[in-house]
Amino acid sequence: MLDTDALTRFVDEMWNASIVAELVEYIRIPNKSPHFDPNWAEHGHMERAAAHMERWCRQQPIAGMQVEIVRLPGRTPVLLCEIPGRGEDTVLLYGHLDKQPEMSGWRDGLGPWTPVIEGERLYGRGGADDGYAVYASLAALQALAAQGVPHARCVVLIEACEESGSYDLPHYIDALRERIGEPSLVICLDSGCGDYKRLWATTSLRGLINGTLIVENLKEGVHSGNAGGIVPSTFRIARSLIGRIEDADTGRILEESLHAQIPAARRQQAEQAAAALGDGVFTEFPWHGAALPTEGDPLELILNRTWRPALEVTGADGLPAIEDAGNVARPRTALKLSIRVPPTCNAKRAAAAVRSALERDPPYRAQVRFEGDMAGPGWDAPATAPWLDAAIDEASRACFGADAARMGEGGTIPFMGMLGEKFPRAQFLVTGVLGPKSNAHGPNEFLDIPTARRVTACVASVLAAHARREG
């Protein structure tokens, strides 16, 4: 049986002696995902990040482990670790090493590529999302080995394209199919947590439609005094087009093909999560002044975030900086749209519906097009086996001192839908360390180190339970 006290001591020592320092150096590498750095291969940052992790993995005293950076022509690399175990069964542990772009708004002394430890938080881009994954995975396996506790054969797969929609990953899954095998359990460490008090199991993920709405009606900018009232504003046209798919007053998505029925079990889990989190569902965000959320009910907010579609304008082009803005009717407005769709929504069909709604019959016969970048599928977890349900709670009680909680997440991990299709008999533990105020993708992103240590210990506990499972 697993000695939990010894487990947590081992894990804590590994994090303090090695892992935190490795993550500090990893954060310094500006290996932005290929969508944000199309010249990633020339810049070499992705290779540096992969080599940084590979070196550490090779240093770990895990018997029989094979470590390799796998490269397919023209694609981002994959770090693969194969660890022998008891029997023929396989567990697949997943994470990614590519990062989101810099983002403005970091407070003084912090920055995306400037690792800073304040108290027990490590600030910087990518530590929690989710550079820690490979370190946590191998630390969990070493903690079991230290006690002689068996585990199944494990494959650790760390991709470098997740923040761009994982478009390289299917090629690697196919190329490595024999080496991966047929996992009975998939552990994904790229998700979030509702608080830092327990282990959170993610039961669903929303899909994502990314694209750019472009509106043009002039060949060049003209004097706004001369054109005002004659030339329609491209911004107003874009605003009108977005109004076809989103209610500007409420934020409700009007395109019905982007909605889905919320399963009763997921609603019940949301109710339990709302009871545990209360106002923490919305107080975690850095509100300005007296700003308010879209709802006051924590349950409705959770459902909004996990099972209902939502739109955000994440970028713009054709708009000069305020200090450079003359009195000009601009010829072009381009808005980057990010649309989250429910886990069971068909993202590709939804993307086609969005494009049709935005492009048809444009006002004033303006030139309008919607250039889609991504239509990533959502994911709804299969029914959890009794052994795994019990193992998740047992791990949370042992390592956090509280029962686990289950909740959908509003983000997108394309890998999960892909794995669900390729390995339909697998069980899934999707978890992570991105909790309140950790601000993944935004400024001041941080890793809560105590939570990362406890999640690592939980992974070890679940791996041990998997090896001794019944039914």
Image (cartoon, helix red, strand yellow):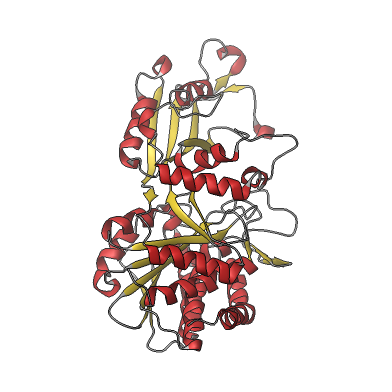
Q: Is residue 315 above or below residue 182?
A: above
The quadrant of the picture occupied by the C terminus is bottom left
Q: Is residue 414 above or below residue 48?
A: above
Q: Is residue 428 above or below residue 141?
A: above
Image coordinates of residue 212 in percent, x first then y, are 44, 37
Image coordinates of residue 288 in percent, x first then y, are 72, 39
Image coordinates of residue 284 in percent, x first then y, are 66, 48
Q: Could you say which is closer to the camera, residue 387 or residue 24?
A: 387
Q: Quadrant of residue 366?
A: top left
Judge whether residue 76 can be spotted in this image. no
Residue occupying the point 30% across, 82% down: 87
Q: Is residue 122 rendered to the left or right of residue 86?
A: right
Q: Could you say which is closer to the camera, residue 53 or residue 231?
A: 53
Image coordinates of residue 298 in percent, x first then y, are 59, 40
Q: Quadrant of residue 124?
A: bottom right
Residue occupying the point 35% across, 55% down: 383
Residue occupying the point 58% across, 45% down: 274
Judge whether residue 194 can be spotted in this image. yes
Q: Is residue 197 rendered to the left or right of residue 146?
A: right
Residue occupying the point 50% across, 24% down: 247
